[in-house]
Image (tube, rainbow, N blue to C red):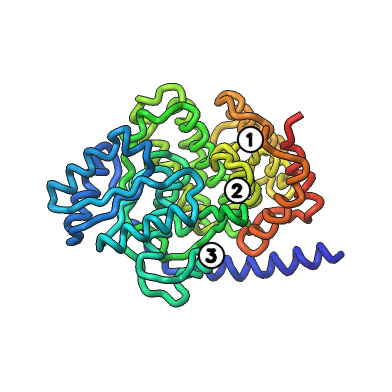
């Protein structure tokens, strides 16, 4: 009875939240796409009058030379580039503060983030901290960046993985290593000004990373579509993203040099990012974030492992929506019932995982950690995600427990 009352309260709260989200003044980034669009973005940055830019990335991308063309183009346009390559997977508060120090000490006027979700998330928070003394911990949650707002440093982004959609979201996630938890923040001010979707930059991405990041994008699209905060616009985006992923991810994994497949995946990731920015995600992310915080499981891999288990649990309340996705992607029997098609869609996700050598279970998961994971996941989701079917703590523990390796 008490749980039913809590669910009713949460449903009412999320209905109000949906109304607020629908009227928020989202300012979507100007988008350059296709081969060479990253250089086009560099010329756009120069045209805005920026003379000194902080380039935020990771050490591997810097070593691979993937940034050379952009750095040369910016230099040719008269823009000085300061390179900060200290971002690592699941960026920490210390890594972000090091970037903030470099930004301020060198008087950088803008930030260019190049990399996966970690680099772009880190750059978002560096941009927020660039004009503010507010600690990162106090920016955690909904619209906390805007409170006491002093402006953000203009941010531009070039994703080098097709997964997170971070280049087009108002979200960022930071790791608090001391508390062993993730700090998610959502605020309109975290949206980049302009982005480039240059699939040609991704042709050298290893197959296992391509697979995991692609499954991350699929998670965004699916959770946005089954969210109770879904809207007509986000439905269109989520369906198209799902179709593109189902049609192109296997090719991108098996033939990494296929630029057409890479471009399709960048578009899918971007569409999924737009969809979940307004519709939200759900328990897959809430649980996966905690796998990342405790075991440093890469986010896309964590989402891929968790997704079928959460969909199995949620299916009674969203079979029709899962069936929609199955029909859109020609999965399952054409004349099948909603339940049959929902089952077929979840089975297809499991088949994709097997094809990409993504495990069904999380080897690092410890039985003793499950209560802590469940508590943190429910806390994250409670007032943030309009999930189709709520969990209590015992149920969440049971779902997470299904992912224990034998």
State which mark lies toward you, 1 or 3.
Answer: 3
Which of the image's four quarters has the C terminus?
top right
- The residue indicated by pointer 2 is 293
CB of mark 1 within 8 Å of CB of mark 3? no
Q: Which residue is mark 3?
A: 137
Q: Is residue 194 visible?
A: no
Q: Give whichever of discs 2 and 3 has the lower sequence position.
A: 3
Taking depth in this image into account, of 78 and 358 the one nearest to the observer is 78
Pinpoint residue 282: horizontal percent, then vertical percent: 62, 52
Q: Viewed as shown, does residue 143 lie left or right of 334?
A: left
As drawn, 6 above or below 158: below
Q: Pointers 2 and 3 in contact (CB under 8 A)?
A: no
Residue 253 visible? The answer is yes
On the image, the x and y values in percent for residue 285 come to 60, 49
The picture places residue 247, in percent across and down from the top left corner, at: 47, 31
The residue that label 1 is drawn on is: 345
Q: Is residue 16 above or below residue 102?
A: below
Crowding at label 3, few (<14), some or many (≥20) Cα neighbours within 10 Å? some
**73 sits left or right of 146 in the view:** left
Which structural element holds mark 3? helix
């Amino acid at each position: 009875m008490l749980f039913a009352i809590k669910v009713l309260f949460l449903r009412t709260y999320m209905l109000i939240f949906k109304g607020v989200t629908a009227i928020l003044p989202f300012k979507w980034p100007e988008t350059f796409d296709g081969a060479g669009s990253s250089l086009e973005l560099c010329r756009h940055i120069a045209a805005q009058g920026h003379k000194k830019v902080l380039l935020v990335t990771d050490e591997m991308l810097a070593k691979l030379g993937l940034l050379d063309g952009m750095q040369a183009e910016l230099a040719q346009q008269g823009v000085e580039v300061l390179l900060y390559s200290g971002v690592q997977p699941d960026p920490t508060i210390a890594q972000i503060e090091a970037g903030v120090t470099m930004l301020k000490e060198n008087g950088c006027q803008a930030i260019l983030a190049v990399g996966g979700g970690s680099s772009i998330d880190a750059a978002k928070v560096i941009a927020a901290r660039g004009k503010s003394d507010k600690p990162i911990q106090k920016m955690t949650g909904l619209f906390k960046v805007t409170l006491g707002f002093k402006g953000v440093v203009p941010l531009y982004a070039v994703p080098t993985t097709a997964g997170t959609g971070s280049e087009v979201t108002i979200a960022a996630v930071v790791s608090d290593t001391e508390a062993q938890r993730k700090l998610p923040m959502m605020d309109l001010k975290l949206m980049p000004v302009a982005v480039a979707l240059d699939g040609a930059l991704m042709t050298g991405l290893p197959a296992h990373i391509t697979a995991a990041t692609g499954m991350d994008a699929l998670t965004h699209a699916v959770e946005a579509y089954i969210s109770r905060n879904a809207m007509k616009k986000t439905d269109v985006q989520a369906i198209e993203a799902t179709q593109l992923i189902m049609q192109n991810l296997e090719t991108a994994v098996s033939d990494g040099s296929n630029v057409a497949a890479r471009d399709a995946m960048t578009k899918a990731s971007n569409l999924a990012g737009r969809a979940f920015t307004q519709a939200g995600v759900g328990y897959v992310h809430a649980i996966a974030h905690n796998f990342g915080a405790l075991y440093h499981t890469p986010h896309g891999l964590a989402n891929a492992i968790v997704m079928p288990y959460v969909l199995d649990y949620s299916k009674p309340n969203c079979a029709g929506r899962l069936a929609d996705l199955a029909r859109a992607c020609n999965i399952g029997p054409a004349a099948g019932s909603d339940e049959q098609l929902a089952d077929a869609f979840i089975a297809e996700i499991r088949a994709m995982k097997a094809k990409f050598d993504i495990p069904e279970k999380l080897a690092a998961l410890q039985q003793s950690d499950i209560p802590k994971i469940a508590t943190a996941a429910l806390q994250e989701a409670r007032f943030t995600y309009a999930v189709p079917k709520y969990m209590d703590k015992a149920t969440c523990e049971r779902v997470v427990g299904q992912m224990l390796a034998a």
